[in-house]
Amino acid sequence: MNDNIVIGLDIGTTKVCAVAATADELDRVNILGVGVAPSDGLNRGVVVNIDKTVASVREAVEEAARMAGVSVRNVIVGIAGDHVQSFQSRGVITISNRDGEITEADVQRLLEDTTHVAMPADREILHVIPQEFIVDGQDGVVDPVGMSGVRLEANVHIITGLVSAAKNIYRCIEKAGYHVSDIVLEPLGSSFAVLHPDEKEVGVALIDIGGGTTDIAVFEDNTIRHTAVVAVAGNKVTDDVRKGLGVMRDQAEALKCEFGVANLEMVEDEEIAIPGVGGRTEKHIGRHSLAQIIQPRLEEILEIAAIEIKRSGYGRHLSAGVVLTGGGALIPGTDELAAEVMGLDARIGRPMGLSAGLVQEVSDPKFATSVGLVLYGLRPEVIGKTPFRTDSLAPGTGTSDGRGLTSRITKIMKDWFNEL
């Protein structure tokens, strides 16, 4: 595979999506290929059937690779699921250099120090995201490298996940014949694709409504402040339609996507014909009745997201409101409903920052995560807006030399995989 080509792989509960992209000499992102395959090997974002997931991964990646005309070895993969948890931590080190200048190595040592927290044996750190650095008591430092000081502290946001969930994702990718360059929390990936830098600065909440999970990320001052994954999402809406109307699951999904509306006030009362089950005659229902089933569940999802945002302590700081993305945000009226439920401005987030290639094909909320993973690999400076160290986030093309924190975590996970 060409080193400049990155494959982002979003392994979701309802679909597996692969996007291949490259960047030209002017740093414009070119989408080369897109592959989508139905997924039924996951439940609420966690792998429950290895073989089905492997088949879906292989189908999606092969389709993207065929479209792009490349052979694929490495992929950047997203991780989600309600096992994902996050918390704040703090670390402190002393600067021992003779001239007192803070170096890149000192920052890495400090970030390493913040990870020394008591955690259950079945959990592992996925990301360590600095919130701010403090040099000799002076807070609000974004990048301390090159400054002089004796004492360096940092407040960090640590995201953890179940070891078994990460291992199963690695196993699926390896069985499909590929290598994992990096593993990224999905709401973090989505944020790279759909959030504008201005929104991240003034305060914004990203709500990614997928099939099995709803991912939430809160940003302020260009930094991620809170993350959460909730196990109530689009599949629950489909189940409600299935049970409420007495139809097959596939029919319920089609009804939701084709005729579903999130807000009763938007509904034009028209009749929908539903095929009968088991040879029975077809039924007719009003579109109003379908909206009466969909709206309460979407309200519940948005209310849970609002509780998570409030729990983060940044609910009053979201001047840019909320950005909704993911397949669940495609139901018409979801943004109006969110504005009503949360009392904040709301918009639908579609992937941005793409210049050429299959831009139209991926300009859809359901591709937010896979496009975000690609941007993560191609443009470390997208993350550089937040105080990440580029050393710990090498471009996801398998070229990392293993010095960064993420690289070390990746190596540890590979070692676990090899021990199995």
Image (cartoon, rainbow, N blue to C red):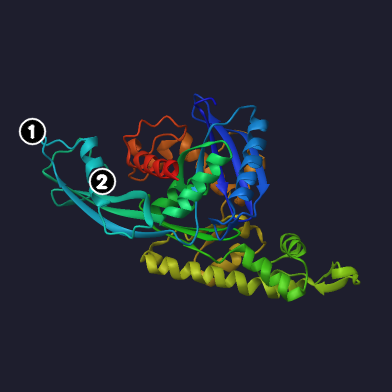
Q: Residues within 10 Å of mark 1 (few under 14, many from 20)?
A: few
Q: What's the amino acid at mark 1? A: Arg
99 vs 321, left or right, is left
119 vs 299, left or right, is left
Q: Locate residue 36, reporting x and y percent.
A: 66, 44
- Quadrant including the C terminus: top left
Q: Locate residue 324, reporting x and y percent.
A: 55, 58
79 vs 291, left or right, is left
Residue placed farthest to the left in the image? 98
- Quadrant including the N terminus: top right
- What's the CA distance linking mark 2 and mark 1? 22 Å
Q: Locate residue 387, reporting x and y percent.
A: 32, 44
SS state under label 2: helix
Q: Locate residue 4, reporting x and y percent.
A: 50, 27
Residue placed farthest to the front in the image? 420
Answer yes or no: is residue 181 visible.
yes
Answer yes or no: is residue 358 visible.
no
Residue position for label 1: 98
Query: Which residue is at a point 35% across and 66% down the rendered structure image?
Result: 313
Observer-side mark, 2 or 1, equals 2
Q: Residues within 10 Å of mark 2 (few under 14, many from 20)?
A: some
Q: Which circle's residue, 2 or 1, is located before the other in the chain?
A: 1
265 vs 82, left or right, is right
Q: Is residue 256 above or below residue 396?
A: below
Disc number for residue 112: 2
Q: Is residue 297 above or below residue 24?
A: below
